[in-house]
Image: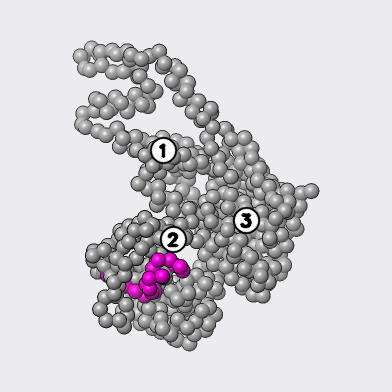
Amino acid sequence: MKFRIKPSSAFLPLIFAIVLIIGMLIGVRLVDRTGDRSMFVYPRTDKLSGVLNFIEMEYVDPISKEDLVEKTIPELLKNLDPHSVYIPASDLQRVTEPLEGNFEGIGIQFNMLNDTVVVIQTISGGPSERIGIMPGDRIVLIDDSLVAGVSIPDTDIVSMLRGLRGTTVTVGVKRQFIPGMMEFEITRDRIPLYSVDVAYMIDDETGYIKISNFSRTTFREYMEAAEKLNAMGMKKLILDLRGNGGGYMDQATSIADQFLGEGCLIVYTEGHSSPRSDVVATSNGINLETEIVIMIDEWSASASEILAGAIQDNDRGLVVGRRSFGKGLVQNQTMFSDGSALRLTVARYFTPTGRSIQKPYDAGSDEYFNDLDRRFLHGEFDEADSIRFDDSLKFVTPGGNVVYGGGGIMPDVFIPRDTAGITAYYTQVTRQGLVYRFAFDYADRNRSSLGRFDNAGDINAYLDRQGLMDSFVEFAEEAGIRRNPAQITESYDIIHTQIKAYIARNIIDNEGFYPIISKIDQAFQKSVSLIGEGARYQLTQMQ
């Protein structure tokens, strides 16, 4: 559901200002005793415009009024809330692309390895795959510009490869075991961005779906994933919203609708100029009998919290993990003629029990966004008992479960951050990115052997026989990390599993990564055990 500012209320102060100054067509000027130039007492327009005009006319140095406006608007918004933002025209496409569900380009995933653009994956059906670009290809030239070995930032590479649909770009490619350089002329096209990272069956009855954000296409992606898993016999679902910072509210409420009976309240919104608006479930859900566990963490925000709150407040399923971010504000986007945009907070949203999960922001934006650091230092990521609750913000679900508002969704089952296997050796090799670099090199060298596998289980079994850790320790030593046998033993499982997961990702993307990395994912394993015990809340239906 989208909210729009009502001109009659949002622009009321401006209308009043215009009425007050309608007769002041000629400003009154005074001259001070020193003979300096006069100053405005009554500006011809509102005070802010008068100040900008005065600066433009009288400032000691030449100044651009347009530049001043661009810098002033963000400062104005800082006095409102942390999520009301101004987006300059130059940034709008970059900011909105992840939520639009597509972009225009050549359709590759790449990484910079030793100052070389290496293709990790080609997007299925995209222009690069159609023309013959392959994983492992090194891009040396882009439209006659050398991009290999010259330390070009990733953002510049992206700018060179992306462009309007129908335009062309020529890339020079070096492929292993092929002499010379290959040249491809690629016609750019619309490339889908997926917000459902992966969907697979953990066992005969339990499915897993990971959603990274809520874009315009998320609900459609979810339905495709859920219908696929339903056809495979899914009766239980683990829905992973960890790290999901939100997006479009209607995408989250549409997914909640799949689990809730007709008439159940999903969320409601209300603001000073926006009357209360309820979103309720229909009778069309495809997961009404599916047991559900939702995973969240401190980076789950906004639309993620709406979905988790709807499931929790309706006693429909378990929420597992750590307290979520705490963003309960609704923004409406207004476009300006120059292509810039204003995202203004117009309402708060409330979970079905009536709780607002928006955390306080009266101390300013810096303190607001530093809240996670304070929570970490306070021990909240390690001990559930460290979280302080305000009894005035206590709410009770229809099933009698106590939930709290005032700062995020508190999970039903707390999972502390996992510190098992974290040693000084592990910290050194991960800080230098050696685990990923080793995994990428290995996948690149052994692509022909690994390419015959199409599932994570077979890749994992094959890699278990390859002595990866011995090779990795030697690789790390060559990078300057001395071996520490005791710490290597302690960190063995986490390093070895990460290496295998990254190798699998380089071969079959997320379908390889997530099933392997889940072996060392404490929250995932706890969720599997809970849902395996049949832990679910009773479905509440409003008649």
Picture residue at 61% right of the left edge, 41% below the top: 269
Q: Earlier in the sequence, mark 2 or mark 3?
A: 2
Looking at the image, residue 375 sits to the left or right of residue 26; the answer is right
Picture residue at 44% right of the left edge, 53% below the top: 97
Label 2: state its secondary structure. Answer: strand
Look at the numbered discs 2 and 1 and tell me whether their residues touch, using CB distance below 8 Å. Answer: no
Which image quadrant for residue 154?
A: bottom left
Q: CA distance from mark 2 to mark 1?
A: 27 Å
What number is the disc on residue 422? none
Residue 20 in magenta stretch:
no
x, y percentage for residue 157? 31, 61
Is 32 drawn above or below residue 241 in the view shown?
A: above
Label 3: state its secondary structure. Answer: helix
Q: Which residue is mark 2?
A: 191
- Check the picture and name the quadrant holding the N terminus: top right
Residue 125 in magenta stretch:
yes
Q: Which residue is mark 3?
A: 255
Q: Amino acid at mark 3?
A: Ile
Q: State how the image is colored.
A: one colour
Look at the numbered discs 3 and 1 and tell me whether their residues touch, using CB distance below 8 Å. Answer: no
Q: Which residue is mark 1?
A: 336
Q: Nearer the viewer, mark 3 or mark 1?
A: 1
Picture residue at 74% right of the left edge, 57% below the top: 539
Is 416 drawn above or below residue 66 in the view shown?
A: below
Q: Amino acid at mark 1?
A: Phe
x, y percentage for residue 309? 63, 52
Task: Please identify the residue farthest to the front as the structure is shown.
Answer: 166
Is 90 drawn above or below residue 496 in the view shown?
A: above
Which image quadrant for residue 413?
A: bottom right
Q: Which residues are magenta?
A: 123-140
Q: Amino acid at mark 2?
A: Ile
Q: CA distance from mark 3 to mark 1?
A: 32 Å
